[in-house]
Amino acid sequence: MTILEQLSKELESEALTTRKMLQRVPKDKFGWAPHEKSMTLKRLVTHIAELPDWISMALNTSELDFSNNEYEPVDINDTTQLLEYFEKNLVQGRTELAKASAEQLDEPWTLRNGQQVYSTNPKGEVLRMSLSQTIHHRAQLGVYLRLLDIPIPGSYGPSADEMDFN
């Protein structure tokens, strides 16, 4: 199996779990945050939903410079819109990954803020990081849901909410 096939397989696997998590998000809690330094639930889930399209960004650009790219998250107002946004970005990520070449994965990609360079990595590593970002933020979402007393679906096996301990 090639690295592109592995990345594609991982994208699909993580999408299943991400979708299950996003389906649990109640719109009446979008403004909630567990701490003043934390993102609101809405901001967190919007970010999770946009992450599959980072594959497109990594493959089709050479860098992300925060100083030249003012970030405006999509305004999501309910769980249906959230899932539609996720699916749209997932299709875009899948499409770009399917068109990618192994040679592209070795090309450098830089994350910066003006002159301050945070990292420069091969695009293949950036694709893995984008999948890891999804997993990381999905875990944050699990904590949010737990604090809101919303049952958590399993990720790599059943969750405590899905287990029968009797």
Image (spheres, rainbow, N blue to C red):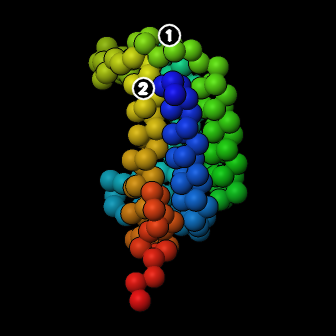
**Residue 84 image offset from top left, x and y in percent:** 70, 48
Q: Secondary structure at mark 1?
A: helix
Q: Position of residue 27 (x, y in %)?
A: 61, 64
Tell me if I can see residue 49 in this picture.
no
Tag 2: amino acid? Val
Quarter the C terminus occupies: bottom left
Q: Is residue 26 visible?
A: yes
**Along the viewing direction, whichever of 76 and 95 lies nearer the viewer:** 95
Residue 159 image-quadrant placement: bottom left
Q: Identify the residue under disc 2.
A: 126
Q: Nearer the viewer, residue 148 or 66?
A: 148
Q: Which residue shows up at 50% across the image and 10% down it? A: 103
Question: Which residue is the site of mark 1?
Answer: 103
Identify which residue, 52 or 106, lies in the foreground: 106
Q: Is residue 7 left or right of residue 33?
A: right
User: Compared with residue 21, is residue 91 higher up or lower down, i.e. above or below?
Assistant: above
Q: Residue furthest bottom?
A: 166
Q: CA distance from mark 2 to mark 1?
A: 14 Å
Q: Earlier in the sequence, mark 2 or mark 1?
A: 1
